[in-house]
Image (tube, rainbow, N blue to C red):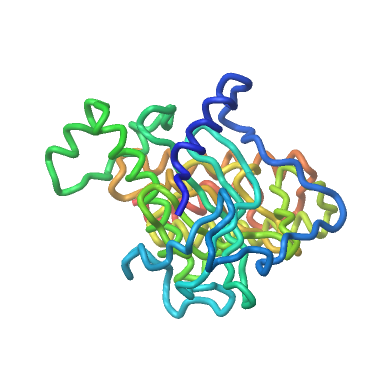
């Protein structure tokens, strides 16, 4: 098994000197137009050793509660003889980077996964994390004090909380039928998620990257409303919803980037986050010509407040 932490740290250091990322427009790997052939899993010799940058499958390192909902989908490779091959970066951001992973058994089946790796304590954390952390407390008072003081240990704990919060939310929402990537497993601060895209490794575009016609725009809006209503009924808000954390794959809308998911009942600002999500995404649809929808973008916030039973 290779030391990913040092290689990943060097990569982040080089990238940090070159560019900065804003809050609303995460930097994404440029998609290659046309067909891109992925390397065959058979080119790797899993008996004599792995090429640099690869690792044995981490499936057996996660306990059952750190794996996705059962039954596991048929496409997911769970064999312990599998190798994780890193194929490149999908997205970089302030809090986490997302890599494309191919998990496969030599001379056997394989699948594509998105590996989301949260930053460690030495790198930038969520710039507005205190508001999202309201209502999230762990049983150990020492951890709560460290989180509040933002000590080194506290920042490490926050990174773990973001990863665990996203995995827990994805597990809960996937089981409820909300359109989110299947959460395959979590290991420390790395999430392995269903890759949303084509079999050649081309990622599905973000909603912000698309220019849907009137019919497709209306269909995407209907899907979004259903998803957000399901979240609200479950007492949750995305917390940072925009056209940059919605994917469009074969006409299907998929919600991503859920570390800041908000429990709208436990969080005293729950109604604020519901309203902000609705207004942010509603403006995008309205600006792109959505008309005659039910509900209209301007009415979405009120609908979510009612569905979450926060209007009493």
**Residue at 81 percent of width and 51 percent of height:** 212
Image side of residue 52 versus residue 261, left or right: right
Compared to residue 110, the image places residue 2 above or below, namely above
Residue 58, quarter of picture: bottom left
Quick check: can you spot residue 311? no
**Residue at 60 percent of width and 32 percent of height:** 24
Compared to residue 217, the image places residue 250 above or below, namely below
Residue 181, horizontal then vertical, whole percent: 55, 61
**Residue at 27 percent of width and 44 percent of height:** 135
Instruction: Return the residue found at the far right.
Output: 34
The foreground one among 266 and 30 is 30
The foreground one among 253 and 82 is 82
Residue 22, horizontal then vertical, whole percent: 59, 26
Image side of residue 118 versus residue 180, left or right: left
The foreground one among 128 and 83 is 83
Quick check: can you spot residue 34? yes
Compared to residue 175, the image places residue 290 above or below, namely above
Residue 110, horizontal then vertical, whole percent: 62, 71
Instruction: Return the residue found at the far left.
Output: 141
Residue 136, horizontal then vertical, whole percent: 27, 45
Image side of residue 258 versus residue 289, left or right: left
């Amino acid at each position: 098994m290779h030391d990913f932490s040092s290689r990943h740290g060097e990569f982040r250091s080089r990238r940090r000197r070159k560019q900065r990322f804003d809050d609303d427009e995460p930097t994404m790997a440029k998609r290659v137009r046309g067909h891109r052939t992925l390397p065959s899993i058979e080119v790797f010799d899993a008996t004599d050793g792995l090429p640099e940058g690869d690792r044995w499958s981490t499936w057996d390192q996660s306990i059952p509660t750190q794996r996705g909902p059962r039954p596991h989908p048929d496409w997911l490779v769970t064999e312990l003889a599998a190798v994780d091959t890193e194929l490149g970066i999908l997205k970089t951001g302030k809090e986490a980077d997302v890599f494309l992973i191919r998990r496969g058994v030599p001379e056997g089946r394989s699948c594509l996964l998105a590996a989301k790796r949260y930053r460690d304590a030495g790198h930038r954390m969520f710039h507005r994390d205190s508001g999202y952390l309201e209502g999230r407390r762990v049983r150990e008072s020492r951890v709560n004090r460290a989180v509040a003081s933002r000590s080194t240990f506290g920042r490490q704990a926050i990174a773990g909380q973001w990863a665990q919060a996203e995995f827990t939310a994805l597990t809960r929402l996937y089981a409820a039928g909300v359109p989110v990537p299947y959460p395959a497993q979590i290991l420390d601060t790395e999430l392995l998620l269903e890759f949303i895209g084509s079999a050649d490794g081309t990622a599905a575009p973000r909603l912000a990257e698309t220019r849907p016609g009137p019919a497709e725009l209306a269909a995407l809006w209907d899907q979004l409303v259903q998803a957000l209503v399901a979240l609200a009924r479950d007492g949750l808000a995305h917390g940072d919803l925009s056209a940059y954390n919605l994917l469009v794959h074969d006409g299907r809308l998929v919600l991503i980037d859920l570390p800041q998911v908000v429990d709208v009942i436990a969080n005293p600002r729950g109604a604020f986050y519901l309203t902000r999500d609705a207004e942010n995404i509603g403006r995008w649809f309205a600006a792109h010509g959505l008309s005659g929808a039910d509900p209209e973008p301007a009415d979405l916030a009120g609908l979510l407040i009612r569905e979450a039973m926060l209007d009493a």
